[in-house]
Image: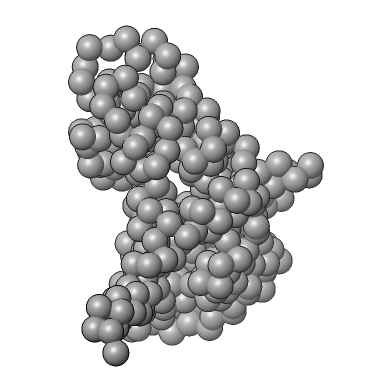
Amino acid sequence: MNPLKTFATATVLLLTASGVAQAGATLDAIKKNGFIKCGVSDGLPGFSYADEKGNYSGIDVDVCRAVAAAVFGDATKVKFTPLTAKERLTALQSGEIDVLSRNTTWTSSRDSAQGMNFAGVTYYDGQGFLVNKKLGVKSAKQLDGATVCVQAGTTTELNLSDYFRTNKMKLTPITYDKSDESAKSLEAGRCDVLTSDQSQLYAQRIKLAKPDEYVVLPEVISKEPLGPVVRHGDDDWFDIVKWTLFVMVNAEELGVNSKNVEEMKKSTNPDVKRLLGVEGDKGKDFGLANDWMAVVIKQVGNYGEIFERNVGQGSPLKIQRGLNALWNQGGLQYAPPVR
């Protein structure tokens, strides 16, 4: 037996088992397909929502478009797959999609046992409650004995149970596969309250026939960091998705946006020059074009732009930046430097 051949074979098996040998496989398949397969929600205004012509919009949608701009230089090279909460993780694990960008909470079990890598936080959220004003409830602490509509297959179910048990209250949960079904049940009076991430509550409220009759209660009962997700085992792809998000956050901090990106290439600020590919070779590090970061910003925008047009003051939701403001403006959005 040739000891060198035996060693080489063992090394290949070890690399395959650890997932290292698969590095780059997802990106190679994406380039061969000519588009990115992006999993999104089954209809949540502001995050991922298709109009009557099938055109998608939303902050989660823009993340996938930004990744397409990074890989192909063309933000339109995306195929969107609408998924329910129950379907989303299996779709990613099975390879049906390349990336999940669907208001999904970063948790320990998803990051480990379920074989996923979260590529950052697109939106810092928290679970809340939506009620009809005629119920006369001002606080979630007044919900003892309530019938609660909740989406199945989510961390929301677990948080709801924990909250009521901690506060020694009773509830009757009614679960639905789709967020729209939960909202319609609240509107029809089949439940007293709808619980979900606060961002979803604001999005669902504007879809009701009489949104002004409903109010989001003040309590936030959980931490819900939402962000894009990829499978374990492909660090090349993970790095691209992760740094696409970081690029948009850094661009806002540096004052670079979709309208001034070309002019900002003349900047003498070394951080801006690296971001826009004027200095250094950051494309080579990722296996992408040297100006890929500038292309992302030009075609999709910086983080502030995608927030404002989809969920912020430029949108029907009109959500305040709050925790999603930049770190130097009182929020939590913070990205590692391009260096």
Residue 302 seen from this side: no
Which residue is more in the foreground, 36 or 298? 36
Is 36 placed above or below 92 here?
above
Place of residue 93 in the rendered image (x, y in percent of width and height, measured from the top left): 51, 72
- Residue 141: percent from the left, percent from the top? 37, 70
The foreground one among 151 and 294 is: 294
User: x, y (%) of residue 312?
Assistant: 47, 36
| Residue 137: x %, y % from top left | 47, 63
Tell which of 281 and 98 is nearer to you: 281
Q: Is 24 left, or right, of 193 in this rendering?
A: left
Residue plotted at (29% across, 90% down): 1
What residue is at 47 percent from the left and 17 percent from the top? 259
241 lies above or below 264: below
* Residue at the right extreme, as displayed: 53
Q: Is residue 321 left or right of residue 182?
A: left
Measured along the vertical axis of the image, is residue 270 above or below residue 78? above
Q: Residue at x 75, y 45 (%)?
A: 54
Q: Is residue 114 visible?
A: yes
Residue situated furthest front in the rendering? 1
Task: Locate the C terminus and report the quarter of the image it occupies.
Answer: top left
Q: Residue at x 35, y 50 (%)?
A: 239
The colour scheme used to paint the residues is one colour
Q: How many marks?
A: 0
Name the quadrant containing residue 52. top right
